[in-house]
Structure formats: C-alpha cells, structure tokens
Amino acid sequence: MTMIQATIERLSAQGIHLVLTQFCDIHGVAKGKLVPLRNLRDWVEVGAGFSGPSIWGTGLPRYGARSEYYGRVQVESLRPLPFMPGVAHAVCDGFAGGAPLDTCSRQVLRRQVERLSARGWKLWVGIEPEFFLLRQDAQGHWRVGDAADQLDKPSYDLKSILRNQAFLDDMRQTLEALGFELQQIDHEDANGQYEINYRFDDALAAADRYMLFKLAAHAVAQRHGQHFSCMPKPLAHAPGSGLHFHLSITDAQGQPVFAQASDPLGLSPQGYAFAAGLLQHADALSALCAPSVNSYKRLAASASISGTTWSPVWKSLGFNNRTCLVRTVAERLEWRLPDPSCNVYAAIAATLAAGLRGVDEGLRAPVACDGDLYQHRAAGGSMPDPLPRDLRAALDALQADSVLRELVGVAFCDEFLQLKNAEWASYSSHVSDWELQRYAVAF
C-alpha cells in the first residue's frame, strides 16, 4: 500500500472526507480551498488548482500554462482540524507550469533551508506569537475584546486570564489536538494582549505551524465572540505585538553551531557572525519582518501607559537584553524585529539568508550593549543606529540592498516591493481623523 493510499484510509477511518489545501499569499494571509480526500494523489502529485492572478504576489499572467497556481499537498502535514469536523488540513507548496514557483514564500524558505542543508546544518526556530483579542462595536470601531481589561500595567494579569479562561482553554485543547506542545500562556503588557508559546521546530515546520496556529486562533476567537488580531500596534498608548524568532543551528552531528559556553554572551564566532549579518541587513530585513504601516508604530521609542516598552528600535546586540534588536539567551539568538503582520516564511527565509551571509563573509558583530538602551538614551549617551522609522524607509532599504534581494529571490522581492509601495502610496494619500481634528479649523 502506498503512503498516499494509507493516508486516505487512515483519515477516512477518522471521519475525514475533505482536505483544506492551504497556502499563503505574499502578505502571509492563509488561502486555500476544500477538495475531496479520495483524490489525494492528484493533490499531492499535481496540486489543487487556483487562478494565479487572483492571488496577491504570484506575478502569474492571466492566460497560458503558467496562469494556474497549483498548491501541492505535503502529505506528511495532513491532520484533522478540530474546528472543522470532517476536514483535514494540508500545507501546500506553490507550483506553476510544473515547476516550483519562485514567488511562493514557502518555496523561498525551502530554498534557504536547502542552502543550509548543503553544509550539513539545520535551523531551529522557536516562534513567540503575541496577539490581541478585539471586538468591533456597532459603529465599526475596534475595541479591546475584554472591556474589563484596563490595568495600566497588565502583564501577567490573572483576573483577565480568569475572565477569558473559556477562550484560552479552547485554544489549549485545539492546539494540543493539532499536535502543538504548549509551553505557556500569559497576558502580555497591553490590554487585550496575550502570548501563547509552544515548542520550537525546524525552520520550515516552524513556519507551517505558525500558519496553523493563526488559522486555529481565528476560528477559536470567533467561537467566543472576539477577533484574533495580528495587527502589530492597535493601541496607541500601549506596547505592540512582536513575533520574536529564537534561532539556533545544529551541525551534521546535532551539535549547536552558535554556542560557546566560555564566551560572555554564550556565542561562538559563527554565532557572532550570524548576528552581524542580521544587523548589517537589518534595514532591508525590516521591510520583510515588519511589513505594515502599523509596524513602525510598534518600532518606535514611544511612551507606554505601562511604563515599559520592549520595542527593539536600535541595531544592537546584548546578553539577555530586551532593549536590543538581537538578544542572546541560552546560547541562542533571539531576533526581535519580526511582528505578526509578516509573511512568516519570507521573514524566516530573509533572516536565514542575512545570517548566513554574515557567516560566509566572516562579518564582525558590534560590541555588545551592556545596559538599558532606553535609559542610556535618556541620559544623553551615544546610541547605535536606529531601524527605519517607517515603511517607506524600510522599502527603500530593501530596494537598495541588492545582496539580500538576490539571496532571498529577486522575483519574490520585486513582487513584494511593488505591492508594498502601492500600500504606502495608499496610506500616504489617506486623510486620518487625527489630521481632521488637528487641521480642519486650525488656520
């Protein structure tokens, strides 16, 4: 019996009759369709078909052999969805004209992983999802989902956890049914903000798992009358949400490449060089890791009602230092730039590409920051260079960084830049309530 036939029989025995073939567009938004389980061989070998131009960022034409986007099911990813009875979820790779599609973000990450595998290395990524629970009122305004969640400093607030226990326990049960190994659930530093941590995985599986996490969170939040939000900073007065990547690499013998116990930061020379690559390309990486207009309201040294902000504003490296862009902890690197509005495949791919370039070029990391950069700034001390201040500057940095664009994939980056430049132009022409309040009758 073939693996595909065995999978059909196993899932059929569990009451599964449909497959949700899921991929993501260039913005990192999940897309897909339902197809019959009985035709699984077709979905694996040829793929579920979609109109290519109907998907953001494929760059596919409206006619011809390459006008169809085919999502080829990765058979090992199939698992029943607890919130969609009778349906199994499947991760798909993008193909067009019978070849891997170079504008498919999962294929972009796959290529980086293959580069790493060629030297006998494997990247492990622990992703820390932070998110908001929101509601929309009758006037269309977005509010914190839990109206009683109003503490000035709400980190680890147990009263909010008790009020939202039904949602949180539903998330626990759903994620465990999907094979997640949960580590912790906590209330974060903004009203309505939570973090759910689960076990790390290899780079491709970690990205797949995060996409599944988002799919589950949207479904569970809707079941409880709320909205799961990946908006980086929905509350102007409070900290925003990050999507921190904990990064480590093992060699062919399973030994950690970044670790060196005798070093003050716990890093090997290769670990320092990887961090140096991240910092050298940080401006361009901002576009892919923090890709929304709203991202740069999180990446700002602004005041917070809680009195604390964890925003990594400056291109810096430090031991267990949450004010730095790269934090070393437990002999690994925490990359604090990404936020949950990113395409997680593209963000990990670009992060890996930049870090590997640092290793290959033997780049030297800056001297580690010792102390709180926010306090240092307040005292008038000299500061590391800041990240781009807005999406426009980040896009310009990506356009100018031909090395990173070549490493990530020119076709993907060109599509990304085209769409994001249009997004910036739309934002720039929008007249906000703030502008009306300040200027309507001021002059």
Image (spheres, rainbow, N blue to C red):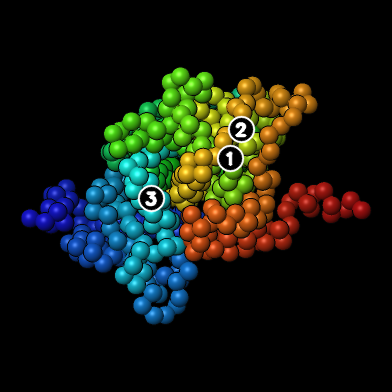
Camera sees residue 21: yes
Q: Is there CB contact under 8 Å for labels 1 and 2?
A: yes
Image quadrant where residue 430 sits? bottom right
Image quadrant where residue 383 sits? top right
Relative to 308, does residue 93 appear above or below in the rendering?
below
Task: Tell me the residue that label 1 is attached to.
Answer: 279
- Furthest toward the bottom, the residue is 64
Tell which circle, 3 or 1, labels the residue nearer the N-terminal end.
Answer: 3
Q: Name the residue rendered at 59%, 50% in the picture.
A: 284
Task: Tell me the residue that label 2 is attached to.
Answer: 366
- Residue 272 at what x, y percent from top left? 51, 33
- Residue 141 at what x, y percent from top left? 62, 48
Q: Name the residue rendered at 51%, 58% in the picture.
A: 406
Q: Name the residue rendered at 33%, 57% in the picture.
A: 92
The mark tally for this picture is: 3
> Which residue is at the front of the view, 308 or 440?
308
Residue type, label 3: Arg
Are there few (<14), some (14-19), or many (20+) residues within 10 Å of tag 1? many
> Which residue is at the front of the view, 412 or 26?
412
Relative to 261, does residue 139 appear above or below in the rendering?
below
Disc 2 is placed on an element classified as loop
- Residue 298 at what x, y percent from top left? 63, 40
Task: Tell me the residue that label 3 is attached to.
Answer: 115
In the displayed structure, does residue 436 sit left or right of residue 321?
Answer: right
Mark 3–mark 2 distance (CA, rounded to whole Å): 26 Å
Residue type, label 2: Pro
In the displayed structure, does residue 125 sit left or right of residue 240?
Answer: left
